[in-house]
């Protein structure tokens, strides 16, 4: 059975991926689901990419780069479901606003996770001048059950937050499964210098059956949970090199668009 190449996986994923921009930050998002009648679609991202804009009811720009389509989604045109504990979020909007594919890519099964040593890839829009959608890959170093997160031996830089992390499936025809959302990068600061570290990828638990639950955007907005303020901004990526992963503050990988933006 021929195996899918990484380049083929990237081509398959590109139509599902968007750049997200708010007045404070930029990041990445991707299609996770469509509603029962396809009137509503769900876009997954990292919570810290949109939590400030959501809290202050600011516009959020969604750019479907592969088609050249870009829309500004205002407060009354969306429903947002934020899981601050996992640093994941889902943005529900009218499907007609973005030319997404008819069907989203499959999510990893509930309560299942990849074993250490498996290779995964992820996509995102680095906050670099003129950067297009970029591909990254690395091996799973650990699975953190309390945080339902992977530590991955690979790079995640500003702007890649919220991008899809995926695994190549041994299937016919060849396809991929979305296993997580890029959340943070934890550099090694043991010597005082910033040395290569590990990326944090949150699993897709929040996204199963989210958008299909709602027949229209009004239903989604009625079910939207109360808005909570974003967590305090932090300048240091890690509290100390000896802190446990539960106590460390990951370095966010969304990019600030202004001097007072989130790191």
Image (cartoon, grey):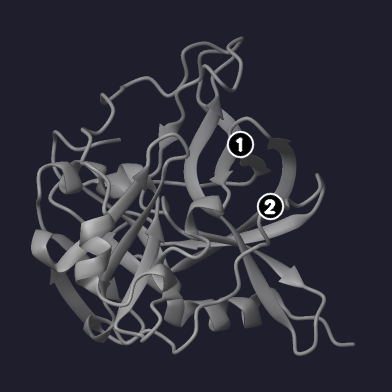
How many residues crowd around disc 2 within 10 Å: few (fewer than 14), some, or many (20 or more)? some
Residue drawn 44% across the image and 46% down it: 157
Work out whether residue 254 can be spotted. Answer: no
Answer with the quarter of the image where residue 202 lies.
top right
The numbered mark, 1 or 2, whose residue comes first in the sequence reads 2
For the residues labelled 1 and 2, the Cα–Cα distance comes to 10 Å
* The N terminus sits in image quarter: bottom right
In the rendering, at what x and y percent does residue 126 appear? 38, 56
Kindly identify which residue carries mark 1: 198
In the rendering, at what x and y percent does residue 109 appear? 68, 61
Is 124 situated above or below 94? above
Tag count? 2
In the picture provided, is 60 more to the left or to the right than 231? left
Q: Secondary structure at mark 1?
A: strand
How many residues crowd around disc 1 within 10 Å: few (fewer than 14), some, or many (20 or more)? many
In the rendering, at what x and y percent does residue 263 appear? 30, 35
Work out whether residue 209 can be spotted. Answer: yes
Q: Secondary structure at mark 2?
A: strand
Residue drawn 50% across the image and 25% down it: 194
Asked whether 99 or 238 is in front, the reply is 99
Residue drawn 44% across the image and 89% down it: 102
Is 219 situated above or below 180? below
Is 181 situated above or below 234? below
Residue drawn 22% across the image and 82% down it: 97
Residue 245 - label: none
Residue extending farthest right:
1
In the rendering, at what x and y percent does residue 238 appear? 47, 19
Answer with the quarter of the image where residue 252 lies.
top left
Residue 138 - label: 2
In the picture provided, is 241 more to the left or to the right than 116? left
């Amino acid at each position: 059975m021929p195996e899918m190449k990484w380049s083929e996986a990237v081509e398959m994923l590109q139509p599902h991926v968007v750049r997200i921009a708010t007045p404070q930050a930029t990041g990445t998002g991707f299609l996770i689901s469509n509603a029962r009648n396809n009137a509503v679609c769900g876009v997954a991202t990292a919570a810290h990419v949109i939590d400030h804009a959501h809290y202050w009811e600011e516009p959020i720009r969604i750019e479907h780069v592969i088609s050249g389509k870009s829309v500004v989604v205002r407060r009354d045109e969306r429903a947002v479901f934020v899981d601050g504990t996992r640093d994941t979020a889902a943005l529900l909007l009218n499907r007609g606003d973005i030319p997404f594919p008819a069907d989203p890519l499959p999510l990893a099964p509930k309560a299942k996770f990849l074993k250490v040593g498996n290779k995964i890839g992820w996509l995102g829009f680095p906050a670099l001048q003129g950067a297009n959608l970029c591909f990254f890959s690395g091996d799973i170093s650990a699975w953190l059950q309390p945080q339902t997160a992977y530590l991955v031996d690979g790079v995640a830089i500003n702007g890649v937050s919220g991008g899809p992390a995926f695994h190549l499936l041994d299937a016919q025809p060849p396809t991929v499964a979305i296993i997580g959302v890029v959340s943070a990068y934890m550099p090694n600061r043991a010597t005082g210098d910033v040395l290569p570290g590990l990326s944090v990828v949150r699993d897709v638990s929040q996204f199963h059956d989210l958008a299909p639950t709602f027949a229209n955007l009004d239903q989604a907005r009625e079910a939207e949970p109360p808005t909570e303020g974003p967590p305090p901004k932090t300048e240091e990526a890690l509290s100390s090199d000896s802190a446990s992963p539960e106590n460390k503050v990951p370095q966010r990988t969304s990019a600030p668009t202004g001097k007072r933006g989130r790191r």
